[in-house]
Image (cartoon, rainbow, N blue to C red):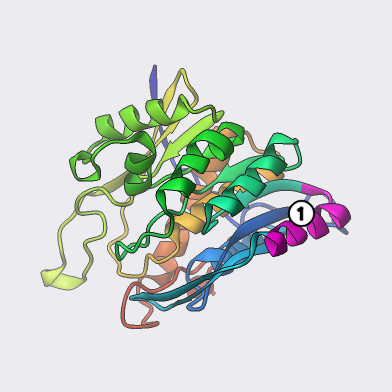
Amino acid sequence: MTATAGAGSLGARSLGAVADAHTPLVAMVIAGSDSGAGAGLQADLKAMSALGVFATTVVTAVTAQNTFAVTAVHPVPPDIVEAQIAAVLEDFAVAAVKTGMLATAATVRLVADRAAAGELPHLVVDPVMVASSGRPFLDDDAVTAYRDLLIPHAMVVTPNLMEAAILAGVDPARQSGVDDMIAMAERIHGFGPTWVLVKGGHLPGVHDAGTGAGAASGPETVTDILYDGTEVLVIEHERVSTHNNHGTGCSLASATAALLARGHDMPSAVTGAAQFVHEALVGAAGWHLGRGHGPLDPFGWASQ
């Protein structure tokens, strides 16, 4: 069965108070650092904070990057990643976990071990495998570890088109429409996650940008596919024509985790996260930060 949903209005400015006025809910982010602060841990921290959730962090890699390039990646040794996870879990009541760039097969495996032990609740796996520039972040062993060890324990896995194709074992160049997204979601669901969200931000024309009479053309809407093994939910939201889209995938996954921590069910968490990202894209559309794909506006600065 296929259903269609628009991303309803949901963001920091409409959520109201957290569950406990004195103690915020806690999430954990396991991901890499982005020196340009548009994606990675920095985007996760901002999205979760904007949605009223206290984000703890586990750093898996340090990257040198800005708005147009990733120039260096330094993985954190797995024992240090493990020590960070242990320290957070020992002291905080973690309500949801989001993984981003895990960098190495060894780190994927150790996170998977924690998930298999039931220690990573409401696990959102954003399988960061390749930079938007095309630079790969993972080798084949790490991709296999994702498929076989980590994804089976995910409440939801959130690949973009390229990542979904890699996981599904199909040619990325041939994946260009909603039917392809559904087919990949079905295949990835076979690995064992409860839900699969295939993001449509890299569909043809979506990243075209410009303003005025010479603006690049593109689709009027962006489509994501959410699949639970039985029902396909088609989530459509208005496309924003902007170059400032660095960190959209990280922000969507971390916003989903934050809303799961707050008690939303999966469809409302994903549609709410999509609306949050949409508003952040709209807010940053006119910014001029960096020379490439700039960051989002998760705090609604543009409207203040």
Q: Answer with the quarter of the image where residue 30 lies.
A: bottom right
Asked if residue 262 can be seen in this view, the reply is no
Q: Residue drawn 52% across and 49% down?
A: 273
Residue 227 position within the rendered picture, expressed as x and y whole percent measured from the top left: 45, 28
In the figure, 85 relative to 114: above or below? below
The quarter in which the C terminus is drawn is bottom right
> In this orientation, which residue lies closer to the viewer: 105 or 40?
105
Q: Is residue 168 magenta?
A: no
Of residue 155 and residue 263, the one placed in the foreground of this image is 155
Asked which quadrant contains residue 154, the reply is top right
Q: Is residue 191 left or right of residue 111?
A: left
Figure quadrant of residue 135 = bottom left
- Residue at the extreme left of the image, as rendered: 214
Q: Amino acid at mark 1?
A: Val
Q: Quadrant of the N terminus?
A: top left
44 lies left or right of 262? left
Residue located at (41% from left, 63% from top) = 281
Q: Position of residue 152 (x, y in %)?
A: 57, 32
Q: Nearer the viewer, residue 149 or 270?
A: 149
**Residue range (magenta):** 79-94
Q: Residues within 10 Å of mark 1 (few under 14, many from 20)?
A: many
Secondary structure at numbered mark 1: strand
| Residue drawn at 51 percent across, 42 percent down | 146
The mark tally for this picture is 1
Foreground pick, 63 / 249: 63
Q: Which residue carries the number 1 mark?
A: 26
Image position of 20 with respect to 1: above or below? below
Q: Where is residue 52 shown, x and y percent of the image?
A: 70, 58
